Image (tube, rainbow, N blue to C red):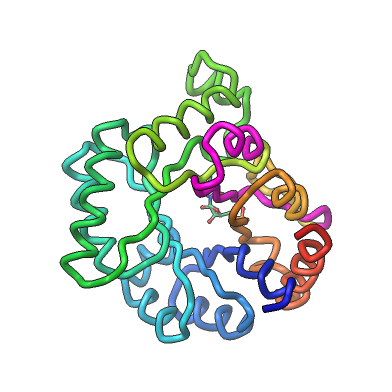
Amino acid sequence: MGNREQVEQRVIVALDVPDEQSAIALIDQLPQVVWWKVGLELFTSTGPKILEVLKSRQKRIFLDLKFDDIPNTVAGACRSAATYGVDLLTIHATAGRDALKAATEASHEGATKAGVEPPKLIAITLLTSISARQLAFDLKIPLELPEYALEMALLAQESGLDGVVCSPQEVAQLRQTCGNDFLLVCPGIRPTWADIGDQKRSLTPAQAIIAGADYLVIGRPITTATEPELAWKRISEELTTVA
Ligand SMILES: O=c1ccn([C@@H]2O[C@H](COP(=O)(O)O)[C@@H](O)[C@H]2O)c(=O)[nH]1
């Protein structure tokens, strides 16, 4: 496999579209994309049907439903989600230690029952749309933002999760503390030519890889581009220079 193909396999494209038809159009427009992320918008619209569409095209799937509830409820949700045979699944670290442990166990149970590989369960540390100011003044968290993100990552690691979703701005610190076997998945990626939108803690694709991200999640810079294929190519070329 060439350097370019290897680096492309570290990009997960966020399929944030309203319906199955738009999703299929985008998937087929970008055949080079190996990883697709199905989030709240699309899954609420299509249900698990979209996962079958992706599997029939041999795609890898990040099911980003960001569960956040009491332990019994998140465990049930993870048990069900794990039966779909997806590769990555999310829960909020703020659900707490008991919920994270219950979710880990339940996702293994669900996968075993369905005869599929369990998903890598990863926790959201702090949404990349939250700034240091919002953390302090709106959420009233009395910790510096990097310290809070690290505490959430350590909670996830101690609870047996496979990794976390974090901002690329915190990834170097998390890599150093959590080690190389802990998955670090970074949304909030913005090439210099893309609008930042609602993201608050972003870096470019190349900067995020250099900082230690395993996977980059990129949505609108590709999916809302006038020419998504060209946006994908530009990102792939940027990454090839550093990978
Ligand atoms: O902290 C988080 C966790 C998840 N996301 C998701 O990633 C994509 C980013 O899309 P862009 O269009 O590139 O901003 C989106 O699906 C989010 O739900 C995140 O941004 N931050």
Residue 132 lies in quadrant: top right
Q: Is residue 195 left or right of residue 116?
A: right
Residue 192 magenta-drawn? yes
Q: Position of residue 133 (x, y in %)?
A: 62, 22
Which of the two residues, 156 or 29, is positioned nearer the viewer here?
Answer: 156
Quadrant into which the C terminus falls: bottom right
Q: Position of residue 112 (x, y in %)?
A: 20, 65
Which of the two residues, 226 or 212, is positioned nearer the viewer here?
Answer: 212
Q: Is residue 166 left or right of residue 235?
A: left
Q: Position of residue 221 (x, y in %)?
A: 70, 61
Highlighted range, magenta? 170-193
Residue at 16% across, 66% down: 113
Count how many numbered circles sit on residues in the image. 0
Residue at 73% across, 52% down: 190
Residue at 59% across, 49% down: 186
Residue 124 magenta-drawn? no
Quadrant into which the N terminus falls: bottom right
Q: Is residue 211 left or right of residue 153?
A: right
Relative to residue 241, is residue 232 depicted above or below? Answer: below
Relative to residue 164, is residue 40 depicted above or below? Answer: below
Relative to residue 9, is residue 243 depicted above or below? Answer: above
Q: Is residue 76 left or right of residue 90?
A: left
Q: Position of residue 87 (x, y in %)?
A: 41, 64
Relative to residue 202, is residue 40 depicted above or below? Answer: below
